[in-house]
Amino acid sequence: MLSSGDRKKGWNFLFAVPVIFFFFLLFVFYLRLDKGPGIIFSPSVLIGHPVSAFTLPALEGLVDREGRPVPGFSSADLKRGEVRLVNIWASWCPPCRKEHPLLQKLSDEGVVIYGLNYKDSSANALTFLKNFGSPFEKVGVDERGTTIIDWGVFGLPETFLVRGDGVVIYKHTGALLPGTVTHILKKVRNVLP
C-alpha cells in the first residue's frame, strides 16, 4: 500500500506535467510571434485558378469621397483586365484594425482594393470605415458567410491578389505587415504590363 507521502508525489507529478507542457507551448508561441517580414504564405487551392462565381451586395450607406455610393462586387468584376487585391475583413476583427493603415498605403500606391465584409452588421462596418477611412474601391457584403467558403478562408483577415483574368495569384493569411505591403507591391508591378 502507498504511504500518504508517495501519494502526494504522484499527485505532484500529475499536476506538473500539464503545467510544464503549457509553458512549453507558451514558449513556442512566443518564438513565432511577429517574426520575419510579416509574409505568411498559406497553401490555397485557388492559387493559379479562377475565383468561383459570386455576387455580393454593396455595404448600404457607404459612400466615396465624392458622396457616390460604393458598389458591391462580383466575380465578373475581377475579370476586367486589372490586378485587384481582395481583402476579407470585419469590424469585430482586431487584426483587421491593425492592418487597415497598410491597406490605405496600398491604395495610395495605386493598388485597386475590393473589400469583402464578412458576417458584420452594416452599422458596425460603416462606423469602422468612417473612423479608419476606406481604402476600398468596392465593398461586398457576405452576410451569411457563404462566399468566403469558396475562397478557402481560414480566419480574418485574409488577402488575395487576383490577376485581371480572375485568377488568384497570391494569398496572405493574417494581418498585413510592412514587409507584406512591399511584397504585394512588387507582385502587382510584376503582373502589370
Image (cartoon, rainbow, N blue to C red):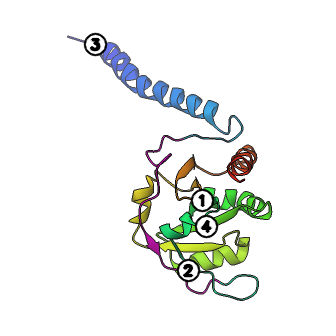
- Report the amino acid beneath label 2: Leu
- Between 28 and 105, the residue placed more toward the observer is 105
Residue 50 is a magenta residue: yes
Task: Say which element carries label 4.
Answer: strand
Residue located beneath label 1 in the image: 164
Q: Which mark is residue 3?
A: 3
Task: Say which element carries label 2.
Answer: loop
Question: Would you call the spot at circle 1 few (<14 residues within 10 Å), some (14-19), or many (20 or more)?
Answer: some
Q: Residue at x 67, y 74 (%)?
A: 129
Task: Name the N-terminal-most of marks 4 and 3.
Answer: 3
Residue located beneath label 4 in the image: 114
Residue located beneath label 2 in the image: 59
Task: Say which element carries label 3.
Answer: loop
Asked if residue 93 can be seen in this view, the reply is no
| Tag 2–tag 3 contact (CB < 8 Å) | no
Range of residues picked out in magenta:
42-62
Task: Name the N-terminal-most of marks 3 and 1.
Answer: 3
- Report the amino acid beneath label 4: Tyr
